Image (cartoon, rainbow, N blue to C red):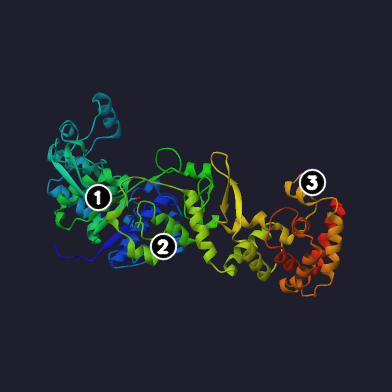
Amino acid sequence: MSERRVRVRFAPSPTGPLHIGGVRTALYNYLFARQHGGDLIFRIEDTDSGRFVPGAEEYIIESFRWLGIKFDEGVSFGGDHGPYRQSERRDIYRKYVKQLLDTGRAYIAFDTPEELDAKRKEVENFQYDASTRMQMRNSLTLPEEEVKRLIDEGCQYVVRFKIEPGREVLVNDLIRGEVRINSSILDDKVLYKSADGLPTYHLANIVDDHLMEVTHVIRGEEWLPSAPLHVLLYEAFGWADSMPRFAHLPLLLKPVGNGKLSKRDGDKLGFPVFPLEWHDPKTGEVSSGYREKGYLPQAVVNFLALLGWNPGNDHSELLSMDELIQLFDLSKCSRNGARFDYIKAAWFNHQYLIQQPDEAWVPDFDRLLQANGIQSTPEKEAEVVRMMKLKVIEYTDSEGNKKKRNISFVSDLWPLTRFFFVAPESFDREDKFIRKNWKETTAQEMRTFMEVLQTVEEDFSVESQKAVVDPWVEKSELRPWNAWRICLVGAGQGPDMYELSAFLGKEETLRRMQFAIDSLG
Ligand code: GLU
């Protein structure tokens, strides 16, 4: 076979928001396409009209725009293999359904749902296949005129794939190697329904991959059971020579426990399973998204890329999209499920967040402050970011243990930075830090310190303060820092004291000191 241009596709069904596992699938397709200088196609598989959800398609497109995953062709992107929405390709599929019927690879079946139910009750583990199809009402058992008459009368029917039993079907998977199954376990899948004039997923998927010249099918493990059927369909159409290579990606597993990652895990542990916030048009339910949660798209991409693949020990875990494109290796993807480590996701976000200039934090930080009733300026906000972005915060893990972590989201800055904007209103005398650092003599020392600060130049810069305070500290042998912190912060936290007092300015600094002296005595 001559070298074909690499063409891959991401083919979601618009049945709701895109799950984070789907994002990973699309990302791997994107990395693979870019690496090989090929094309990535965006196809909408909407042949199941009953499951269509309005807004889902737009949501998916917006998700990839945000993540920086770009498509070369497809719905909303154009291209010369369209239309790319399956509901707009009815006539194309009809031709191929007819081909299978004409060549005897498929047949028409009239069995009603009631008849099928009755059969299921009658025959244990009933499956519509070579062992049962001759007992059913279909074009293999009914006379030709009868079939024609039923169709002319408008009887609903389906077209079923006629699977030849006892054959070994080989799926050659780039990740899983050779997967062999016996065709006898497969049922005669429905390929087309007269009721809506649409093919089912299997037929549309194969026909489109063929017509769109797809060379590699990279998709989630949940599609592996369909692969033997797909191989047989390629053969039945006479397309075996140009059949795409398969690569079934490992499942994403729950952060704790067994089984695959679900929305419930996210709800329980407090992380999103969707790229963007999703507003369910039917129930009105809102599900959180990575974007709204404060993730940077680069962090999400980096985190997802390493769920099921890694570049080996010689490489840092921090990889840009360009580096991922270079290093990605489909054949080195894991066969085992990848545990969804949401704490690691937050770690990645921290890494990317601190690489950003302080000013880049400002829009989100400003929104956060405003939501808490605080007005400030971009300059002041960037200044606070600079002082606080490397602090750690405490959190409680899923087992109830107190832990510390880096600031991973702009929203982590609240309540950590409240004191920059709001002076302490009271002091907790039971607080360990206050008990330890506010003694009998402290109020008097702070009064003296206030007199020293009065003499600092009005700009109250770190340098101006140091010029006056450092020599005084040395001479007086007083250590005012912790008590001063209590005055300005109200607790044992915050940035360097000179930086904080410079930020607050002389007047506010002295005002807070006076208030603490009056309150704590
Ligand atoms: N429409 C399928 C989905 O929703 C596509 C599966 C495939 O890639 O073949 O994931």
Relative to the observer, which residue lies in front, 16 or 31?
Answer: 31
Q: Can residue 42 be seen from the camera position used here?
A: no
Q: Nearer the viewer, mark 2 or mark 1?
A: 2
Q: Residue at x 52, y 45 (%)?
A: 283
Q: Is residue 248 something one can see in this rendering?
A: yes
How crowded is the residue under tag 1: few (<14 C-alpha within 10 Å), some, or many (20+)?
many
Q: How far separated are the C-alphas under marks 3 and 1? A: 73 Å
Three-letter amino acid code at the position of disc 1: Leu
Residue corresponding to mark 1? 203
The answer to which image quadrant residue 41 occupies is bottom left
Ligand 1 neighbours mark 2 (CB distance < 8 Å): no
Coordinates of residue 507 in the picture (x, y in percent): 82, 68
Question: How far separated are the C-alphas under marks 2 and 3?
Answer: 48 Å
Decide if residue 160 is on the left or right side of residue 462. left
Residue 168 versus residue 424 in the image, above or below:
above
Q: Is mark 1 within 8 Å of ligand 1?
A: no
Numbered tag placed on residue 125 in the rendering: none
Q: How many marks?
A: 3
Q: Which residue is mark 2?
A: 319
Could you tell me how far apart the alpha carbons at marks 2 and 1 are, in whole angstroms?
A: 38 Å
Which residue does the image show at 40% across and 39% down from the upper left? 259
The answer to which quarter of the image holds residue 35 is bottom left
Q: On the rendered structure, is 269 left or right of 477?
A: left
- Residue that badge 3 annotates: 429
Please tell me which of labels 3 and 1 falls first in the chain.
Answer: 1
Pick the front one: 449 or 472? 472
Foreground mark, 2 or 3, reads 3
Which quarter of the figure is the N terminus placed in? bottom left
Residue 30 on image: x %, y %: 34, 61
